[in-house]
């Protein structure tokens, strides 16, 4: 189901095999990669044959916090190696250069979390490598670890990081919160918690490092080839040009292959640098669930002050995220959590204190939404609870507080977006029959319906696209009326191989199949930045559109003519990075979800009976691909909200397999009824904005609200398990 | 080590290996059938699904010895048949393919379903795909792909 979509004439657009092309870019085409993938022709990292391939395994810490006293190693047969920090060249560093460089390539003298890399064991035979690994004995002297927020804040066992375990702290403020609270006639408070979430991409982490043409080449299932190049170059102490990274078709990522491949690539590169042979480091599923980063757990307290007309006049929020043992991207995740902390509302006096803490858990890292789902879950549940406290309809109360164009945001800037939430609500109400079901289910003992309103900033926070990334794209006229597209953003399932081709083809008047866009190779493509932050279409896609216009102007100069485009920040946006003041994002995607459930009073199990979604993503580059994003994002988010429990016990994740960490199957949820509304963005290709993370944000609070309405008890935490419902109903 | 014979995609093959070696590894390593993917290695995800004597099985759970004398069909064995092409085209037109890692297994599950029920309704499709996990699509467009294959391929199954 698709609503009105921006009409754009596409000159020279032609029909392609089997799919009728129309005048609008949004009209679906068959994905360029569909056939090769469906039939199993496509090769992923584990499918390639490398001559003389060596198999690597990590020796990992078995303790959460300990000194390493001694490592007892068996004799290694010829051709088998033990690689550790002493193998890093003297020009290099034992640090992984990510957003921060505090994460060590190899643990030396102490360990900070269970799973920390101590060494690489490698050799020609997989089984012998495993046998050697099992015969290594590490003698530890245990220290007192910190796992929880309370442990971190009380510096249990001494600080893991700095002198107070605070990786970063921010204070956002708009208006005068303390004065406003003095005028409040009612105050409502709530504390909201979210847990770890495992990405569970179907293809596990996998990289192969090879020694080719006297340099290191890393083949990687990855979102960000240039991140890997930089981190490997810094670890080895060589110029970035000496490292080549080639992305292999990536079987899902969801943020899990944004920074984390650097944690594998750096020790792997040290090993390849030493043995000068190809080495494979491909995780099995148990390793992948046990020893990769997860979504940051959060604990958010919100206090709201109301006047006598039930208007929110003040809000005070305290946000904590658990970054684990190393900072990596945690500060940016915290920023996104607080920048989305008051959701889609206009709160005249609001304050958010945000802190990211260090513990001895596996370092948390990027996951679709990057902090926003945590912040949005808390504010949406809180708004629902405040409405409940006031005896008001939850949706009416929230809609009364919607932010509007030119209202002031939490970062003291004007909201520049054309906010279409009221129209979107009308649409979803019509689709789902929400308003009448709210009344109908009010006295129903088992049925409930919930709603959530969200937005998601597209691109890097603030002026990051200009100050940090400065993306570049290139195009070239090729033989046979084709054009080459050279960008560093990757296909990882989200459809970029198709949507980028459509954007370029539309400007050039070519068939999308005549655009050549290979998996990025850092020796060939310019750095257009990483594949993350809902930036690929909105930011890089816009560069592709502008670059294609330039190439078209020069097209008649002949085969080989090239064009380039470099990122320019939209005019009129201001940003102060230290204090997070100004225009937090160039634009936002907006969304509403409605979820309907029925709960079983005997087993406490919840069955979802209806899912509706309305999105403002500017313009869909391809309606079918966006339908796939909507269904996929919502169902992954419903897993997070309901069944995906990832518990930590003494620093170890209790779930290790797909049998105990369960994700939604085709039977768990019904179809996601989706609608896109038209709201073109000036600086997006054909008007498109970011979409990949937005589609995750609304379902968790909508689901939790539906369940609380069904059971008649407030919900503060996710995942909402049957055990939690049983406790609530006791 | 034992020599074990079975029929792979219509041709008899003979593999000399430990009978306890996983059929998944035999297919991928010895027979280079990389359309068979390893997703979990414990029979939960269906990425390694193949047909064994017409029945959908996870090849990571089958020791080579148990495949002796049986007929094994991998994605390579059906992708160029009329049925395989019909499913692949339907998946393509439905938008059923995202990262693609689960998709060959989904094709096998679809083939297994349509063989016993060529006009499945949505709930029968969801039931038939429930042993194959996908993290990208939320399943809706895969279900649609199976529906399209069933409509277009009514004379094939």
Image: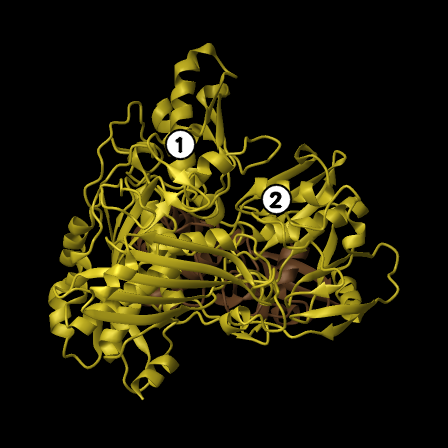
Tell me the yellow chain: A
Q: Can residue B156 be seen in this view?
A: no
Q: Where residue A221 appears, x then y in whole percent? A: 57, 48
For mark 2, give the secondary structure: helix
For image coordinates 84% across by 66% down, the residue present is A73
Q: Considering depth in this image, is A218 or A18 the residue closer to the camera?
A: A218
Asked which colour scheme the image uses, the reply is: by chain
Looking at the figure, which quarter contains the C terminus of chain A?
A: bottom left
Image position of A727 with respect to B32: above or below: below
Tell me the brown chain: B
For image coordinates 26% across by 69% down, the residue present is A705
On screen, residue A55 versus residue A247, left or right, reads right
User: Closer to the observer: label 1 or label 2?
Assistant: 1
Q: In the displayed orientation, state which residue is furthest to the top.
A: A557
Q: Do the residues labelled 1 and 2 touch (CB within 8 Å)?
A: no
Q: Can residue A613 be seen in this view?
A: yes
Image position of A41 with respect to A550: above or below: below
Image position of B28 with respect to A142: above or below: above
Disc number placed over residue A639 in the picture, else none: none
Q: Where residue A393 appears, x then y in whole percent? A: 15, 67
Q: Earlier in the sequence, mark 1 or mark 2?
A: 2
Image position of A189 with respect to A347: above or below: below
For mark 1, give the secondary structure: loop
On screen, residue B114 versus residue B12, left or right, reads left
- Give the labeled residue for mark 2: A228
User: How far, Cα to Cα, is label 1 from label 2?
Assistant: 26 Å
Quadrant of residue A237 within the rendered picture: top right
Quadrant of residue A719 within the rendered picture: bottom left
The numbered mark 1 sits on a residue in which chain?
A: A
Q: Where residue A427 appears, x then y in whole percent? A: 16, 52
Q: How crowded is mark 1: few (under 14 residues within 10 Å), some or many (20 or more)?
A: some
- Give the labeled residue for mark 1: A569
């Amino acid at each position: 189901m698709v609503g009105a979509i921006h009409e754009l004439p596409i000159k020279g657009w032609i029909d392609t095999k089997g799919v009728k092309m129309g005048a609008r870019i949004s009209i679906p085409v068959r994905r360029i990669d569909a056939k090769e993938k469906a039939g199993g022709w496509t090769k992923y990292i584990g499918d390639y044959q490398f001559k003389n391939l060596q198999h690597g395994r990590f020796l990992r810490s078995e303790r959460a916090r300990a000194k390493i006293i001694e490592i007892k190693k068996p004799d290694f047969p010829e051709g088998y190696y033990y690689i550790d920090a002493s193998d890093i060249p003297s020009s290099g560093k034992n640090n992984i250069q990510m957003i921060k460089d505090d994460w060590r390539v190899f643990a030396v003298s102490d360990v900070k979390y269970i799973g920390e890399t101590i060494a690489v064991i490698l050799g020609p035979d997989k089984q012998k490598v495993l046998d050697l690994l099992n015969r290594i004995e590490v003698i530890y002297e245990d220290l007192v670890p910190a796992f929880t927020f309370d442990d971190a804040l009380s510096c249990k066992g001494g600080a893991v990081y700095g002198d107070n375990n605070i990786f970063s702290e921010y204070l956002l403020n708009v208006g005068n919160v303390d004065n406003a609270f003095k005028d409040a006639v009612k105050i409502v408070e709530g504390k909201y918690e979210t847990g770890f979430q495992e990405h569970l991409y179907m293809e596990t982490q996998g990289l192969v490092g090879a020694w080719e043409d006297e340099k290191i080449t890393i083949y990687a299932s990855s979102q960000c080839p240039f991140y890997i190049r930089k981190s490997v170059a810094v670890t080895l102490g060589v110029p970035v040009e000496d490292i080549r990274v080639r992305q292999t078709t990536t079987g899902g990522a969801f943020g899990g292959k944004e920074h984390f491949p650097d944690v594998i690539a750096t020790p792997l590169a040290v090993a390849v640098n030493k043995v000068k042979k190809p080495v494979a480091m491909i995780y099995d599923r148990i390793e992948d669930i046990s020893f990769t980063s997860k979504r940051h757990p959060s604990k958010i307290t919100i206090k709201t002050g109301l006047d006598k007309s039930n208007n929110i006049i003040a809000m005070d929020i305290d946000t904590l995220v658990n970054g684990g043992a190393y900072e990596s991207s945690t500060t940016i995740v915290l920023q996104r959590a607080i920048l989305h902390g008051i959701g889609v509302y206009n709160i005249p006096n609001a304050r958010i204190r945000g802190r990211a803490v260090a513990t001895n858990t596996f370092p948390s890292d990027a996951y679709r939404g990057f902090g926003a789902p945590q912040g949005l879950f808390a504010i949406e549940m809180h708004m629902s609870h405040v409405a409940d406290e006031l005896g008001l309809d939850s949706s009416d109360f929230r809609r009364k507080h919607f932010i509007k164009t030119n209202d002031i945001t939490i970062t003291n800037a004007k909201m520049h977006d054309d906010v279409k939430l009221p129209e979107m609500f009308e649409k979803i109400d019509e689709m789902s029959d929400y308003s009448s079901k709210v009344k109908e289910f009010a006295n129903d003992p088992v049925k409930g319906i919930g709603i959530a309103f969200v937005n998601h900033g597209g691109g890097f926070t603030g002026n990051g696209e200009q100050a940090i990334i400065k993306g570049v794209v290139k195009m070239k006229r090729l033989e046979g009326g084709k054009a080459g597209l050279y960008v560093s953003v990757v296909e990882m399932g989200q459809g970029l191989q198709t949507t980028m081709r459509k954007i370029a083809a539309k400007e050039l008047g070519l068939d999308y199949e005549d655009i050549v866009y290979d998996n990025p190779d850092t020796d060939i493509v310019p750095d257009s930045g990483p594949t993350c932050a809902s930036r690929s279409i909105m930011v890089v896609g816009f560069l592709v559109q502008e670059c294609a216009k330039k190439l078209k102007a020069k097209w008649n100069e002949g085969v080989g003519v090239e064009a380039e485009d470099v990122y320019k920040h939209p005019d009129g946006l201001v940003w102060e990075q230290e204090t997070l003041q100004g225009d937090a994002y160039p634009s936002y995607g907006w969304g509403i979800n409605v979820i309907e459930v029925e709960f079983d009073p005997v087993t406490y199990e919840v069955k979802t009976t209806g899912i509706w979604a309305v999105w403002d993503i500017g313009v869909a580059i391809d309606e079918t691909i966006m339908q796939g994003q909507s269904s996929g994002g919502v169902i992954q988010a419903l897993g997070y909200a309901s069944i995906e429990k990832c518990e930590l016990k003494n620093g170890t994740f209790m779930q290790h397999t797909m049998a105990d960490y369960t994700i939604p199957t085709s039977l768990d949820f019904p179809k996601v009824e989706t609608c896109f509304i038209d709201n073109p963005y000036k600086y997006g290709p054909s008007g498109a904005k970011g979409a990949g993370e937005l589609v995750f944000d609304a379902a968790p609070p909508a689901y939790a609200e539906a369940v609380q309405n069904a059971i008649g008890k407030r919900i503060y935490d996710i995942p909402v398990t049957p055990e939690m419902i049983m406790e609530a109903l006791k | 080590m034992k020599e074990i014979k079975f029929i792979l995609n219509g041709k008899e093959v003979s593999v000399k290996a430990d009978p306890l070696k996983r059929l998944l590894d035999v297919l991928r390593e010895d027979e280079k059938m990389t359309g068979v993917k390893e997703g979990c290695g414990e029979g939960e995800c269906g990425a390694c699904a193949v047909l064994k004597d017409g029945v959908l099985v996870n090849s990571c759970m089958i020791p080579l010895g148990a495949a002796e004398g049986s007929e094994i069909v991998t994605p390579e064995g059906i992708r160029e048949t009329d049925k395989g092409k019909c499913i692949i085209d339907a998946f393509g037109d439905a938008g059923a393919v995202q990262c693609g890692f689960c998709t060959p297994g989904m094709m096998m599950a679809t083939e297994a379903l349509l063989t016993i029920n060529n006009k499945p309704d949505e709930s029968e499709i969801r039931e038939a795909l429930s042993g194959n996990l996908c993290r990208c699509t939320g399943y809706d467009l895969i279900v649609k792909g199976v529906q399209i294959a069933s409509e277009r391929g009514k004379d094939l199954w």
